[in-house]
Amino acid sequence: MTSRFKLAKIAWLMLMLVLTSVPATQALAEPFVTTERGFTTGTNEHITSLRQAGPLTIVEATYVDQLTGFLIGPAPGAFQQISNSRTGTAVFHGTEVCTCTTTDGRSGTITLFFEGTTAADGSSIGRLIFFRGTGRLNGLSGEATFKGDINSPNLPYVGTFIVTHDAPAQRR
């Protein structure tokens, strides 16, 4: 009976050790959703590939976006655009990684995926997906939309961000 009591006591102590090693803030924090706005400005574009296939022009390039608003910082990346000379339209997609600081001062990196279309009049619409935050941006993800002239100095976006216990934004 004594050895069974010792085993139960050891198991109880191990359980208490595990439970007390988890910070209480992690257990109590809940994810929340916030709507944020910002701008992206493209700079330093460098065409890495240019191909023609009938009426289609395929451009691949690297660039650096500068994000302002909710996320602030440089975001180097790469994109591909396919333009149709018959219709004057284009589709594009790409990724970038922003070394960002939020408006409340937390920093880290976050990956952005974007895709969109450009009409014959030059207006573009599309979406941005924010994911894989690191540092103090860990736990931040979101989706935003943009609409405007893709070549304008400041392309506005607005989106919904999900913030978990590790993420930077404060409840509003």
Image (spheres, rainbow, N blue to C red):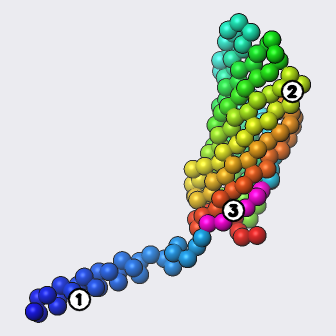
- Please state the horizontal and vertical placement of residue 64, each as a whole percent of the image: 72, 36
Q: Main secondary structure of the magenta part?
A: strand
Q: Which mark is residue 93?
A: none
Of helix, strand and loop, which one carries label 2?
A: loop
Q: Is residue 161 above or below residue 23?
A: above
Q: Are marks 3 and 1 in contact (CB under 8 Å)?
A: no
Q: Which mark is residue 33?
A: 3
Of helix, strand and loop, which one carries label 1?
A: helix
Report the residue at 25% width, 82% height from top. Answer: 11
From the image, tell me which residue sits under label 1: 9
Q: Amino acid at mark 3?
A: Val
- Please state the horizontal and vertical placement of residue 83, each as a whole percent of the image: 75, 19
Report the residue at 68% width, 38% height from top. Answer: 114
Q: Amino acid at mark 2?
A: Gly
Query: What residue span does the magenta drawing correspond to?
Result: 31-36
Distance (Cα) linking label 3 and label 1:
44 Å
Of helix, strand and loop, which one carries label 3?
A: strand
Please rate how many residues cluster around mark 2, counting C-alpha atoms within 10 Å: few if below 14, some from 14 to 19, many from 20. Answer: some
Q: What residue occupies the far bottom of the structure in this picture?
A: 2
Residue 115 covered by magenta stretch: no
Mark 1 or mark 3, which is nearer the start of the sequence?
A: 1
